[in-house]
Image (cartoon, rainbow, N blue to C red):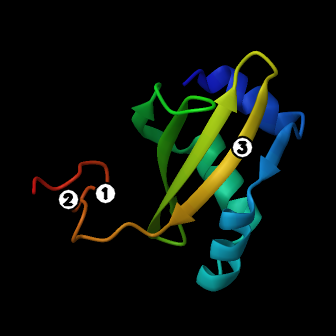
Amino acid sequence: MNRNKLREALHKKRFEWRRHILERLTERNISQKAVIDVLVYGEEIEDYPGNEPYPSALFLGWVEGKPLHVVVSLDEGAKYAYIITTYEPGLDTFEPDFRTRRKR
């Protein structure tokens, strides 16, 4: 994912909160600011270029000392982002670095 285009979309407020993420934010007591901070300052840990209708990526950031994952897709042509979901990753799925998926 082109980070510069993603940051530009976020900076220009050219993004949409999908209903799914808004529900998760409420359930998990996560702020919208925390999600945006992860997308702007966090680390892209997985790239999904084949996702439809737009390529997407998984980002890792730290909020109040806890890991936070955020999935976002980007329409690079329109420079418009769709924030899809967020969650606190667990050790059942990720290694302790929260970047690497556990082998099954």
Within 10 Å of the Cα at label 1, are there few (<14), some (14-19), or many (20+) other Cα atoms? some
Q: CA distance from mark 2 to mark 1?
A: 5 Å
Amino acid at dot 2:
Glu
Residue 29 coordinates in the image, percent (x, y): 65, 82
Q: Label 1, on which residue?
A: 98
Q: Give the label, 3 or 1, closer to the camera.
A: 3
Q: Position of residue 28 (x, y in %)?
A: 59, 81
- On the image, which quarter does residue 20 sit in? bottom right
Nearest to the observer: residue 92 or residue 48: 48
Q: Residue at x 46, y 26 (%)?
A: 50
Mark found first going from the N terminus, 3 or 1: 3
**Residue shown at 82%/21% (left/top)?**
78
Q: Secondary structure at mark 3?
A: strand
On screen, residue 94 versus residue 80, left or right, reads left
Point out residue 33 in the picture as x, y percentages from the top left corner.
75, 61
Q: Is residue 98 above or below residue 49?
A: below
**Residue 104, quarter of picture:** bottom left
Q: Nearer the viewer, residue 44 or 24?
A: 24
Residue contact at pointers 2 and 3, CB within 8 angstroms: no
